[in-house]
Image: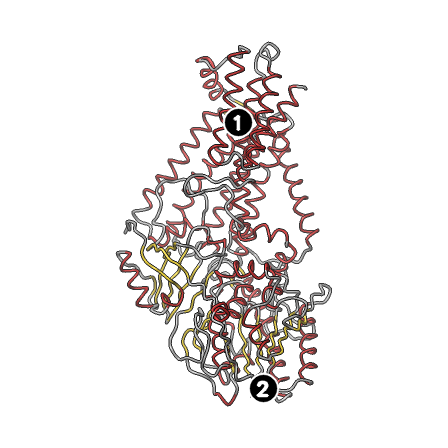
């Protein structure tokens, strides 16, 4: 077998050796740490795989290259390469089958590597490492080598541009802080480029010649990732890494629904074709930079690169050391939340206070089943729920939504502040229908998938009580499996009127659904009907019917929004959004009028609400799923009870989680289910609203408590997996007068209990301080 083929096989085997602990999900130590982190770590897994591949190829590719040095025939390089390949194959096979796992796998691999090297030296007289070899390494470090200066220089400039744009979007930072942060990022990127240089150089030195195509193609992913990250941060206020982690492998398999949910109007084939073309284009550009660098004979001494790495680390550390004396805690924490790559050992406090917690499950439905007690529904009015997409609370005005403004002011229950339970549609719907914190959604979906999609318990309860359930939606509800998870399949639970004809504009689908609803209404008797109606036109791209006269002019006509809009551009985008809400207002008015025409309106429960809000550069971003700030989670919640019941009590803070307990409170005549996250909106007691998310964007904040003008924000490690954590960090706390800054963690705990007294028994089994030292 030719030596170059053996080198290639050992190099490829090294790649497999490196990634085997990930593929087989090996575990290490008492804590059972694994390179495979779980379902929702897609982006992290990409980086882990690249790192493992590099380490494995360095190890075994380097061995193959060393065996070929000198008189390979006299040193029996071929024999020892085959031996190494056999040993490697056996080790990888044992690792994949879990006969070797964890540290045993790594130690066996190291022992096999040493055995081949020792055997070659001892039996075939291959020269071992000597002092002269050490000198040659030093000489190699000091000698100028060709390097791809065009690629690395362009990448460095691209990183600085991206960092500058991100720093500019941090509006809470003053000019001095932004300048200091840019200096920090300058030094950080110097170190990053230096490390990347050595990774690529070592990959080239230890790999077969043909592997350079693969290595530089992987390197071309770096500028693509930077550009994509700039797009994600500027458009969604979310990093590329957070998006990939939240997407997960399931999201990749259902990319068509993910694209629709993100407002990207291209098909899956087109999307992946574009991805391939972009990769080919950037790979070609990368190879062009190689030829340009060779043509201009760019050279660099590796020792200079090492010095630059040290300089970058020292400069970033010095900036942080000086900055800790004058940067405010909150702004210092914000800069660290905004940038994932931080190399300084000097860091801000990770939060204000740290807690060990256990969240309540709020499985009120399971409690009822286990206790063999069924909620007794004695009143059966018609119930109509209209979800309006991306409806932020401050857009409910007389000018934008005149009908809904009147509906709220004159007919709906008086509610001062409405809160979405998350910043994404599927989680907002889930919380509204289940009165469970959205952190339970992932497990709920997995369980219902195993049960062949029975539908949510609240809907099954209504069905068993004699309700006819129907949903009208201008989509297939395939996004995150909302349709089968919530409403079951094949009309088993709901009569599903879904129009997802991509050739039919969204507003026309809504009109067709409304006409279908009116037709069904004419043949229905009063009572025992539960109807959901979705209005999606106010989702990005913000549309309205062709026959509708948009009241706000001029409006934005492009497909994408500018990342740094001026005042005129921002107003035009807002006008487009307002026009879509004005269209939604008309649909809601026509819907309610049809109930009046059918003599059903007065005796029905009519609920109109937003699923989440929408950001328009309020905090430097667009759209939603990127923070728990007011613009993304403060929504209108409007509830009209049957006329005979009156408008209901005045409430200050109401959450989507309170809706289903309120409905069941009315239907059971004051006997709502226990163990719900929400409280009945027919009860006048004040309550804390909670919102959680797996998509916290630049803030990294995953939970919000809100009550009477006070808000507490929390974060935790790996929040993007969307499941309840065991420990959380208070990242900030605000009140009517601004930020709340206290001297100790105990003070924060006492203040939390003072301003959110009901939150602890309702949302947590336990909530106490973690034993750790607090830094003021």
Which sits in the foreground, 152 or 691? Answer: 691
Give the distance between the C-alpha atoms of the residues marked 1 and 2, in whole angstroms.
Answer: 74 Å
Horizontal arrangement in the rendering, residue 675 relative to residue 253 (left or right): left
Rendering coords of residue 191 (x, y %): 45, 35
Quick one: label 1 or label 2, which is nearer the N terminus?
1
Rendering coords of residue 193 (x, y %): 49, 35
- Does 104 sit above or below residue 638? above
Locate residue 257: give its quadrant.
Answer: bottom right
Rendering coords of residue 442 (x, y %): 53, 58
Could you tell me which secondary element the residue under label 2 belongs to? loop
| Label 1 environment density (alpha carbons within 10 Å; few <14, some 14–19, many ≥20) | many
What residue would you read off at disc 2? 601
Q: Which mark is residue 429?
A: none
| Label 2 environment density (alpha carbons within 10 Å; few <14, some 14–19, many ≥20) | many
- Does 17 sit above or below residue 337? above
- Does 690 sit above or below residue 137? below
Could you tell me which secondary element the residue under label 1 belongs to? helix
- Does 614 sit above or below residue 464? above
Horizontal arrangement in the rendering, residue 755 relative to residue 370 (left or right): left
Tell me the mark number nearer the camera, choosing from 1 and 2.
1
């Amino acid at each position: 077998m030719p030596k170059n083929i053996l080198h290639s096989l050992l190099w490829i085997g090294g790649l497999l050796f490196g990634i085997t602990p990930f593929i087989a999900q090996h575990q290490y130590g008492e804590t059972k740490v694994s390179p495979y982190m779980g379902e929702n770590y897609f982006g992290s897994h990409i980086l882990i795989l690249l790192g493992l591949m590099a380490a494995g190829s360095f190890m075994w590719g380097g061995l193959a290259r060393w065996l070929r040095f000198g008189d390979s025939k006299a040193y029996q390089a071929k024999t020892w390469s085959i031996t190494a390949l056999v040993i490697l194959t056996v080790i990888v096979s044992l690792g994949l089958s879990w006969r070797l796992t964890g540290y045993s796998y790594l130690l066996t691999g190291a022992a096999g590597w040493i055995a081949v090297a020792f055997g070659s030296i001892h039996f075939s007289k291959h020269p071992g490492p000597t002092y002269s070899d050490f000198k040659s390494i030093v000489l190699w470090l000091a000698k100028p080598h060709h390097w791809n200066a065009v690629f690395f220089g362009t990448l460095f400039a691209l990183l600085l541009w991206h960092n500058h744009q991100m720093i500019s979007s941090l509006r809470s930072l003053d000019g001095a802080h932004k300048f200091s942060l840019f200096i920090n990022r300058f030094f950080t990127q110097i170190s990053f480029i230096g490390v990347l240089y050595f990774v690529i150089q070592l990959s080239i030195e230890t790999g077969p010649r043909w592997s350079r195509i693969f290595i530089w193609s992987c390197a071309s992913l770096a500028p693509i990732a930077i550009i994509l990250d700039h797009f994600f941060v500027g458009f969604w206020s979310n990093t590329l890494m957070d998006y990939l982690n939240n997407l997960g492998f399931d999201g990749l398999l259902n990319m068509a629904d993910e694209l629709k949910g993100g407002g990207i109007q291209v098909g899956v084939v087109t999307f992946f074709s574009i991805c391939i073309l972009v990769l080919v284009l950037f790979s070609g550009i990368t190879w062009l930079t190689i030829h340009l660098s060779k043509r201009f004979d760019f050279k660099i001494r590796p020792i200079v690169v090492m010095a630059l790495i040290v300089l970058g680390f020292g400069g970033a550390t010095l900036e942080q050391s000086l900055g800790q004396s004058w940067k405010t805690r909150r702004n210092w924490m914000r800069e660290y939340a905004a940038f994932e790559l931080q190399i300084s050992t000097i860091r801000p406090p990770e939060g204000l206070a740290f807690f060990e917690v256990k969240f309540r499950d709020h499985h009120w439905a399971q409690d009822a089943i286990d206790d063999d007690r069924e909620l007794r529904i004695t009143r059966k009015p018609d119930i109509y729920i209209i979800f309006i997409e991306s409806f932020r609370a401050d857009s409910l005005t007389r000018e934008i939504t005149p009908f809904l403004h009147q509906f709220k002011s004159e007919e709906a229950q008086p509610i001062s502040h409405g809160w979405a339970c998350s910043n994404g549609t599927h989680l907002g719907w889930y919380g509204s229908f289940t009165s469970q914190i959205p952190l339970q959604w992932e497990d709920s979906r997995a369980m219902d998938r195993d049960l062949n999609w029975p539908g949510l318990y609240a809907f099954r309860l209504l069905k068993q009580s004699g309700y006819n359930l129907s949903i009208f939606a201008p989509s297939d509800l395939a996004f995150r499996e909302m349709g089968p998870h919530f409403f079951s399949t094949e009309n088993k639970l709901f009569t599903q009127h879904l129009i997802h004809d991509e050739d039919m504009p969204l507003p026309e689908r809504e009109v067709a659904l409304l006409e279908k609803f009116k037709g069904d209404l004419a043949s229905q008797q009063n009572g025992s009907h539960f109807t959901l109606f979705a209005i999606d036109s106010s989702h990005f791209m913000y549309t309205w019917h062709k026959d509708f006269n948009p009241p706000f002019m001029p409006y934005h006509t492009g497909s994408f929004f500018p990342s740094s809009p001026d005042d005129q551009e921002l107003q035009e985008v807002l006008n487009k959004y307002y026009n879509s809400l004005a269209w939604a207002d008309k649909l809601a008015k026509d819907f309610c009028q049809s109930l009046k025409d059918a003599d059903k309106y007065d005796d029905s429960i009519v609920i109109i609400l937003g699923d989440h809000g929408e950001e328009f550069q309020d905090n430097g971003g667009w759209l939603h799923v990127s923070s728990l700030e007011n613009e993304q989670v403060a929504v209108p919640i409007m509830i009209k009870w049957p006329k005979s019941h009156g408008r209901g009590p005045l409430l200050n803070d109401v959450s989507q989680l309170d809706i289903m307990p309120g409905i069941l409170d009315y239907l059971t005549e004051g006997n709502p289910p226990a163990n719900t996250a929400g409280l009945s909106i027919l009860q006048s007691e004040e309550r804390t609203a909670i919102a959680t998310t797996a998509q916290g964007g630049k803030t990294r904040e995953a939970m919000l408590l809100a009550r009477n003008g006070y808000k507490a924000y929390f974060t935790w490690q790996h929040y993007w997996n969307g499941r309840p954590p065991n420990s959380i960090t208070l990242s900030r706390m605000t009140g009517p007068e601004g930020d709340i800054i206290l001297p100790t963690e105990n003070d924060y705990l006492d203040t939390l209990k003072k301003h959110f007294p009901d939150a602890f028994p309702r949302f947590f089994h336990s909530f106490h301080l973690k034993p750790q030292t607090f830094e003021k």
